[in-house]
Amino acid sequence: MKTPRTKSMTKELMTSRIHELNPDLKAYNIAETLDLLEEVIFESLIEDKTVKYGSLITFVPEWKDGRKYYDGLGKLRGDKGNPIKELPRHKHIKLRKGSKLRALEKASRD
């Protein structure tokens, strides 16, 4: 595989790499599968389901309660309203490292 110009592994580069590792798979099928995987993960997170992707990473959806916060910049911009704003309840996606990522980090320290 040729070295990519960027250090990012894009979906196109992943498709090419998977095709190199398994030539029986067609590149367009791999790309469609990656798109479907992305869609399934997204829909699961919308439904508040935890998604574990192998031993690499786990996506954990959590709801954060609404809270008040101080908007001190409002005075600098000339706002005459109340500087205390309300942040609504919202979903926050936490990422947990899997065993392979933890092993990779541990090996890089040695």
Image (cartoon, rainbow, N blue to C red):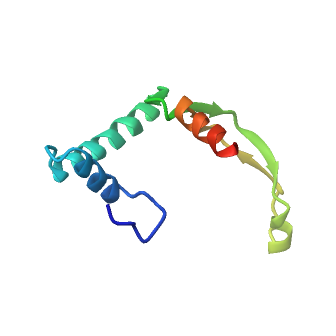
Q: Position of residue 22 (x, y in %)?
A: 21, 44
Where does the N terminus fall, quadrant-wise?
bottom left
Q: Is residue 80 above or below residue 28?
A: below
Task: Say which of 37 and 84 sits in front.
Answer: 37
Asked if residue 79 lies left or right of residue 58, the reply is right
As rendered, which of 110 and 23 lies closer to the eye? Answer: 110
Where is residue 83 shown, x and y percent of the image? 83, 57
Residue at the image point whose x is 41% and y is 31% from the top = 44
Residue occupying the far front of the picture: 110
Q: Is residue 73 above or below residue 32?
A: below
Q: Is residue 75 left or right of residue 2?
A: right
Q: State the residue in front, 73 or 20.
A: 20
Residue 92 in view (yes/no): no
Residue 96 picture quarter: top right
Q: Residue at x 49, y 63 (%)?
A: 7
The quadrant the C terminus occupies is: top right
Going 30% across and 45% down the picture, which residue do you hit? Answer: 34
Q: Is residue 98 above or below residue 2?
A: above
Extreme-top residue of the structure: 49
> Residue 74 location, x and y as percent?
81, 66
Q: Position of residue 106 (x, y in %)?
A: 65, 38
At a point 73% along the width and 46% down the height, the residue shown is: 86
Work out whether residue 16 can be spotted.
Answer: yes
What count of labels does the image hold?
0
